[in-house]
Image (cartoon, rainbow, N blue to C red):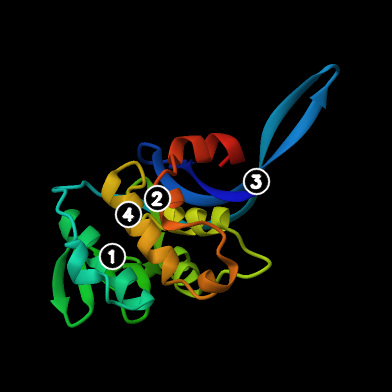
Amino acid sequence: MAFFRIKPVTKRRKDAKDKTYYYVYEVENYKRRYGKKVKVKQKTLRIVGPYREVKKLKNAELTQGRIEKLDRAALIEAIIVQNLKNYGFKKTSNRQYQKGVLTIDLEKHRVMDNATRKDVYIGINNGYFGTETIRKLHKFKFNEGTSMIDFVKAVSTAGLLDLDKGEGKALLALLATKTPGYAETHQVEEEEIAEVSLEDFRKKFGW
């Protein structure tokens, strides 16, 4: 199972101090045998993009009753907006938010550094909030090729929810029921999703 990790890259300079940058990589685990011992190694599949750390300023929560009637796309956007407010982003136009050089365009599902004009990934809720992760979440569907594991991975990787908190689990359950294909597959009921332990999930699936 492929997953994302942050890795440092140090750039050497002749006339100044070395500088370390952080990038999001897509990696996967594999096993290698050394005699009688087997060790788990990581293989880098690709560089996803630059990583930016932002500080969480508050822990305001969404009002459950206000969002239950939203469709899936609107619910995802409402959760994103609440996250952005908690991390200090300010609304600059109809569907754009900004903090320093970082701009979030909710219409285009894009996260960008204005200084470099490149897509970046922001550390939100222990995830990687960025153009690719958000677009994948919006496109996710339950079918024969996807499972609840894939759904939880998509939500957590995008940093959409803090799944170690009760509100995060409740919103995960609500979002699952609004995801295309859920009614046909009935893979997990809402009560079961609410019992998800993210730490146990990561340990079990090596993610």
Which residue is depicted at the point 56% across and 42% down? Answer: 207
Q: Residue at x 37, y 75 (%)?
A: 72
In the displayed structure, 43 sits above or below 160; it is above
Label 2 with label 4: CB-CB less than 8 Å: no
Instruction: Identify which amino acid the numbered label 1 is placed on.
Output: Ile
Q: Position of residue 123 (x, y in %)?
A: 34, 50
Circles 4 and 3: CB atoms closer than 8 Å: no
Q: Taking the image as drawn, is residue 8 in sight?
A: yes
Pick the residue in front: 102 or 190: 190
Where, by quadrant of the figure, is residue 68 drawn?
bottom left
Which residue is identified by label 4?
Answer: 170
Say if 129 sits above or below 194 in the image.
below
Label disc, if present, on residue 28 of the rendered structure: 3
> Which sits earlier in the primary sequence, circle 2 or circle 4?
2
Query: Hey, what amino acid is under mark 3?
Result: Glu
Q: In the rendering, which numbered label is found on residue 127?
A: 2
The mark nearer the N terminus, 2 or 1, is 1
Report the residue that reaches farthest toward the right: 35
Residue 80 numbered mark, or none: 1
Q: Nearer the viewer, mark 4 or mark 3?
A: 4
Neighbour tally class for label 2: few under 14, some 14-19, many 20 plus, Cα within 10 Å: many
Q: CA distance from mark 4 to mark 3?
A: 29 Å
Alpha-carbon distance for marks 2 and 4? Answer: 18 Å
Lateral position of residue 72 relative to residue 183, left or right: left
> Does label 3 or label 1 sit earlier along the sequence?
3
Marks 2 & 1, CB-CB < 8 Å contact:
no
N-terminal label among 4 and 1: 1
Residue 100: horizontal and vertical position, in percent? 18, 61
Question: Looking at numbered disc 4 in the image, what kind of residue is underneath it?
Answer: Ala
